Image: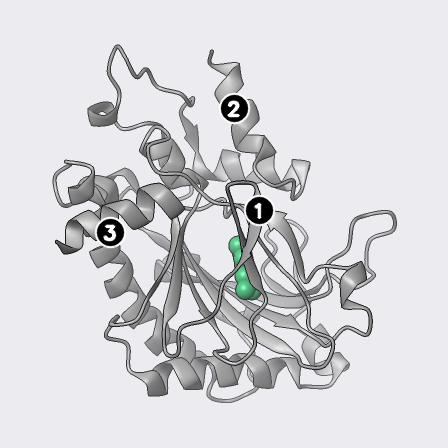
Amino acid sequence: MVLAEIANAFEQYGFFQVVNHGIPSSILHNTLSAGKQFFDLPAHEKQKYANNPLTYEGYGSRIGVQKGAILDWGDYFYFHVLPASIRDPSKWPRKPVSWRETMEEYSKHLSKLAESLLCAMSMTLGLAPQGLRQSFGGDINLSLRINFYPPCPQPNLTLGLSAHSDPGGLTILMQDDEIPGLQVRYDGNWIRVKPAPGGLTVNLGDQIQIMTNGIYKSIEHRVVVNQHKERVSVAAFFSPGNDTNVGPMMELTSPDRPAKYPKMSFKEYRSFIRRRGTQGKQVLQSMESSTQ
Ligand code: OGA
Ligand code: NI
């Protein structure tokens, strides 16, 4: 039965690929290509959209920018898409000209997919179909991050993206079919994810671990770089509204299984993570011990 398989994928791995997702391949292709075209622009053009250190929104580079910090070999463009009220169109690139329309179109399809995944996930947990969706608050937030990993002459010396779990709820990642790079931590080992042609990779973030009281877990992952080829990926983060208080769902706690995590708004959680930096899952683990 499909639900049982989904439950197993969520519970055992927290990471899986979906192939029959219903998003036309032309939309996937156009999105990846618009993302890539932005990074192909000259540096001065990209710098017009330099990110804001408070919100992270805009273009940023992790190559050689902060003295003493552990650096990742990659650039990114991060922006908010939904709800429309948190969008800042002045931060969206004007080039390539197809960017806006393409990203909006892709986001519409992604939102449908995310709603179905949350519904399936709720059912595997014995919750009402809208159970998890309701824990995200009235407006589910969607932000996209386009990642760009240039070829690296000494790929063994660095990472494209250091080990982390995604702080939000649910991530849907589109990656180039031809160029692997993503690795997932499973049983203490780093496992390579071979992209399924036309597929999307789904993984659970920290907020789902909190909502499900640890039944489903966010999984650590990282990106290795390629010596010869650049790689582009589009990560879509679905998160609770900024001010929504997130804590373990009542239905998933019991005297035998008390709430493992304190309630916290996503905004507070995110600023906590940003202060501490990327450190695998240490932030979530420290919250766990603080309630015991
Ligand atoms: C991320 C992420 C993976 C990739 O953006 O959070 O994990 O393959 N990206 O770029
Ligand atoms: Ni990630």
Label 3 amino acid? Ile
Q: Residue at x 44, y 42 (%)?
A: 218
Q: Which residue is mark 1?
A: 189
**Is there CB contact under 8 Å for labels 1 and 3?**
no
Q: Earlier in the sequence, mark 1 or mark 2?
A: 1
Q: Position of residue 74 (x, y in %)?
A: 69, 66
What secondary structure is found at the residue carrying circle 2? helix
Q: Earlier in the sequence, mark 1 or mark 3?
A: 3
Q: Position of residue 111 (x, y in %)?
A: 29, 63
Q: Which residue is mark 3?
A: 6
Q: Residue at x 77, y 55 (%)?
A: 71
Whether 163 is drawn above or below 260: the answer is: below
Whether 192 is drawn above or below 210: the answer is: below
Label 2 amino acid? Met
**Is there CB contact under 8 Å for labels 1 and 2?**
no
Label 1 amino acid? Asn
Which numbered circle lies on residue 122? Answer: none
160 horizontally vs 55: left or right: right
User: Which image quadrant shows ligand 1?
Assistant: bottom right
Estimate the spatial distance between the alpha carbons at disc 3 and disc 2, rounded to whole Å.
28 Å
Whether 260 is drawn above or below 25: the answer is: above
